[in-house]
Image: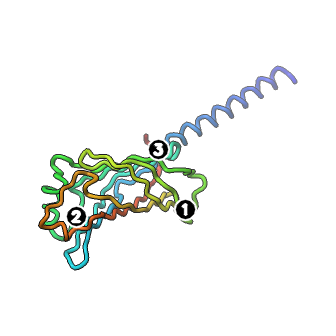
Amino acid sequence: MSMKNRMQQRFFTGFFVFCMLAVFAVHAQIKYIDKRGVIVFEASEKFFEEVKAKNKSVTTILDVIKNEIASLALIRGFRFKNPLMQEHFNENYIESDIYPKVIFRGKISDFDLNDLGSGAKKFTIKGVLEIREQKKSIEPVVQIQLINGVISLQGSFMVLPQDFDIQIPKIVENKIAKEVMVRFDFKLSANEDD
């Protein structure tokens, strides 16, 4: 092989390796994000007024390389049908002026973006939910699927108010469920700006 051919071969080999590293570096920085995620919580009891609120502006970020997920919801973003209930929730129960946000951080077990399809698959997220500066480990089972480049992630879990030092007054304790059902629905799109 001539010197010229060896130099061309080295050039193309080096160029190929450079291109592959560049592609990997770009792919490694892709995160999926949803700034309009939905969280609904319900603590209703039969025969009493519905205790249910929805937040439609939850920010969630999924790192598809590390399989890490983080969500942030502002407490005042939760909306009740009854304005008085919303006021009591913010002022008396959560004290949203002091504790303005809910944070969740976790890792999705056995998750691989390349294995996703349009059919939903079940995964477990092991993480920590923080409300009122109180932290609680949770492991929700979620349904994840990839539809037209968007990751759909849905799931639910139960929590207890006392886990987050939330005091329920005696006068209303029979009207509020002992366990609170939390459901979430995120539609995450690729974000290559990170």
Residue found at the far bottom of this picture = 47
Q: Whole-percent x and y of residue 167?
A: 18, 56
Task: Please rate how many residues cluster around mark 3, counting C-alpha atoms within 10 Å: few if below 14, some from 14 to 19, many from 20.
Answer: few
Q: Earlier in the sequence, mark 2 or mark 3?
A: 2
Q: Residue furthest top?
A: 3
Question: Do callouts 1 and 2 mark residues in contact (Cβ within 8 Å)?
Answer: no
Which residue corresponds to the image point at 27% horizontal and 46% vertical from the top-left? 134
Q: Nearer the viewer, residue 32 or 184?
A: 184
Of 138 and 17, nearer the camera is: 138
User: Disc 1 and disc 3: Cα gap in Å?
Assistant: 25 Å
Marks 2/3: CA–CA distance: 32 Å
The quarter of the picture where the C terminus appears is top left
Residue pictured at 73% horizontal, 30% vertical: 13
Tag 1 residue: 121
Q: Is residue 16 above or below residue 96?
A: above
Q: In the displayed structure, does residue 9 sit left or right of residue 141? A: right
Q: From the top left corner, tell me how far across and down residue 3 is, in percent.
A: 82, 20
Q: Which residue is mark 3?
A: 192
- Residue type of the residue flagged with mark 1: Lys
Q: Which mark is residue 79?
A: 2
Residue at point 47%, 50% (across, down): 190
Give the distance between the C-alpha atoms of the residues marked 1 and 2, in whole angstroms. 30 Å
